[in-house]
Amino acid sequence: MEKETICAIATPIGTGGVAIIRVSGAEALDVARQIFPALEHAEPRRAIFGKLEFSGVIDEAIALYFPAPKSFTGEDVVELQIHGGFYLSNAVINALISAGARMATPGEFSKRAVLNGKMDMSEAEGIIDIINADSISSLRAGSALLGGAMREYVDNLQQSLTNCMVDINVALDYPEYDIDFVTLPQVRERVKAVLDTLDRVLKTASTGTKIKQGVSVVLAGEPNVGKSSILNQLVGYDRAIVTDIAGTTRDTVEGSFEYNGVRFNVIDTAGLRETSDTVERVGIERAEAEIRQADVVLSVVDSPNKTPEKIENSNIIKVLNKLDQHGKTLGDFDIAISAKTSENIEALKQLIFDRTINSAVMSESLILTNARHIEVLRRAKEKLEQVLQNDTNELECVSVLIMDAWNTLGEITGTTANEEIINAIFSKFCLGK
Ligand SMILES: Nc1nc2c(ncn2[C@@H]2O[C@H](COP(=O)(O)OP(=O)(O)OP(=O)(O)O)[C@@H](O)[C@H]2O)c(=O)[nH]1
Ligand SMILES: [Mg+2]
């Protein structure tokens, strides 16, 4: 268990009705009592109303005491609910530091919770994903992590691998016994079953990543075709300037909307054309960079007789805009819309969704949204695939590979992660969490 008692403001830094300050560690009660004497009569998990007293300041506050191990961190924790003044919060932190605590580092409360066995690393990552969620699907994915979906999945895989290793070791260590030993083909069958469940889950990674980060949708096309007008229609308010002057948009403009529970980040760009204007040219270079990185590009033209610009992306939706001006000819286009009358804007959203999100994945109970988890599962998969290769024909080698895969999987839950990995993960958390 960590020795030092730590403190931090758990609520957003700024002014608000109430701020919550957390203190965790063996000295939490003693430290907090120095500025909140009513804690002397603290009962576990019961709110105490009392006076906050330090540096000649007297204010009213509420304190909660969670003795170890029944607390978020698994250590003694005191939470102070104080008035939400920016200056007051900092002054209370300074008073707690004078009383013997030290400032927590980002994610340190969660890190202690993991180190003290209150949750595993994937569950802690779930909390951060819940905090950072910006759509119902990303919120659901975060809550599935916190609920232990990933931990259970990894535990099950590890259990299957453990069973394999046990049987292999029996075969290797007790050849004189008269029992049915596991054979290499049998081990390979069992590893294949583990690989199948890995593959099933890895198939959710592409959609999962988009659920977490949002889908990037880039509007591209010649000047004046109505790209900014389409952005405004998609996001539902006048985000970008629209005029009838070609070359109105020069820098990239971003907005976002949620559709079918997924966040779509739309990037409007400068119209693509040859130009001698330096500023416009830089804007066009930015547009081209966005186009290359996009999950999907809306290639917009405003007349059925025009051909879309050459777009460097493999996922393109050909959009014919200004439908109100030129009858219902679809021709070579994927969709015809009007950013003026809003016609087919909902259909455009559906098309963007269909082109980027695998909706079957959305109903899976475990969706891979976390890049770290995806990378670890891919590495475990590579190790297990070697078991199936013909040059691996000794049970000893197979056992080593399976052990390797088992250890790799443990990086997700944190059981086999080294301190460097653990620190790197928690440094991404926010202060006070
Ligand atoms: N009739 C009609 N006019 C439209 C439609 N969409 C956009 N416009 C008009 O077309 C003109 C150009 O629209 P913008 O949205 O600024 O076009 P843009 O592609 O962003 O242009 P740049 O920023 O210069 O590249 C404006 O006068 C819009 O009002 C539409 O569906 N129908
Ligand atoms: Mg524009």
Image (cartoon, helix red, strand yellow):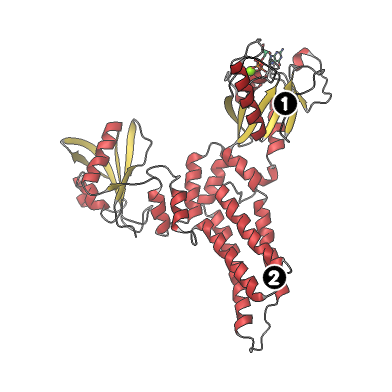
Q: Residues within 10 Å of mark 2 (few under 14, many from 20)?
A: some
Q: Residue furthest left?
A: 56
In this picture, residue 249 sits left or right of residue 127: right
Q: Which mark, by number, is residue 299?
A: 1
371 and 118: which is toward the camera: 371
* Element at label 1: strand
Q: Which residue is mark 2?
A: 392
Residue at x 57%, y 26% (from the top left corner): 254
Ligand 1 found in image quarter = top right
399 and 288: which is toward the camera: 288
Q: Is residue 377 above or below residue 207?
A: below
Which quadrant is the N terminus positioned in? Answer: bottom left
| Residue 383 sits in quarter | bottom right
| Residue 152 sits in quarter | bottom right
Which quadrant is the C terminus positioned in? Answer: top left
* Element at label 2: loop
Q: Amino acid at mark 2?
A: Thr
